[in-house]
Image (cartoon, rainbow, N blue to C red):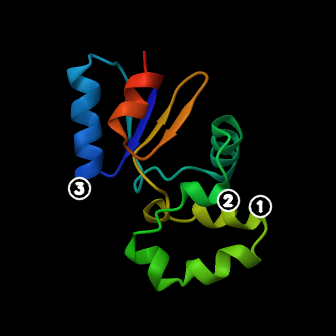
Amino acid sequence: MLFIEYPKCTTCRKAKKWLDEHQVSYEDRHIVENNPKAEELKEWIDKSGFPVKRFFNTSGMKYRDLGLKDKLPQMSEEEQIELLSTDGMLVKRPLVIGDDFVLVGFKEEQWGNTIK
């Protein structure tokens, strides 16, 4: 399982603690130092069944600075994925990628129901 995080993010720290407490093994990846590539994002989005917008960190400064709330609706899915792949700070985190699931953000109940 792949755990993608920004180590300074408090939600990511809570999620990592949850994984450790539940003795879930994972590979850790720093989202800024090793930003997801467009191909990876496309695969994860397809696997998750979520819309691309769900993968944007809508509460992040970068999202607001770029005015993406107004720009995203005019962009194609491919353009949105390409934009996400340019900067890890645009991507909602943490991300957990399993063999047959993708979790975006940390919701303890959802994680408990999905991660075995």
- What kind of element bears circle 1? helix
Find residue 14 and report its horizontal and vertical position in percent.
Answer: 23, 41
Mark 1: give few (<14), some (14-19) or many (20+) Cα within 10 Å: few
Separation (CA) of disc 2 from disc 1: 5 Å
Find residue 108 and report its horizontal and vertical position in percent.
Answer: 33, 35
State if disc 3 and disc 2 touch (CB < 8 Å): no
What amino acid type should be assigned to the residue bearing mark 3?
A: Lys
Which residue appears at 66% of the width and 81% of the height? 71
Find residue 34 and report its horizontal and vertical position in percent.
Answer: 46, 49
- What kind of element bears circle 2? helix
Q: Tell me which label, 1 or 3, sits earlier in the chain.
A: 3
What amino acid type should be assigned to the residue bearing mark 2?
A: Ile
Residue 98 is left or right of residue 26, and the answer is right
Q: Tell me which label, 2 or 3, sits earlier in the chain.
A: 3
Q: Which residue is mark 3?
A: 8
Quarter of the figure with residue 62 = bottom left
Disc on res. 61: none
Find residue 13 and report its horizontal and vertical position in percent.
Answer: 23, 44
Mark 3: give few (<14), some (14-19) or many (20+) Cα within 10 Å: few
- What kind of element bears circle 3? loop
Separation (CA) of disc 1 from disc 3: 29 Å
Q: Which residue is mark 2?
A: 81
Separation (CA) of disc 2 from disc 3: 24 Å
Which residue appears at 69% of the width and 40% of the height? 43
- Residue 85 seen in this snapshot: no
In the figure, 10 relative to 40: above or below?
below
Q: Which residue is mark 1?
A: 78
State if disc 1 and disc 2 touch (CB < 8 Å): yes
Of residues 73 and 40, which is closer to you in this image? Answer: 73
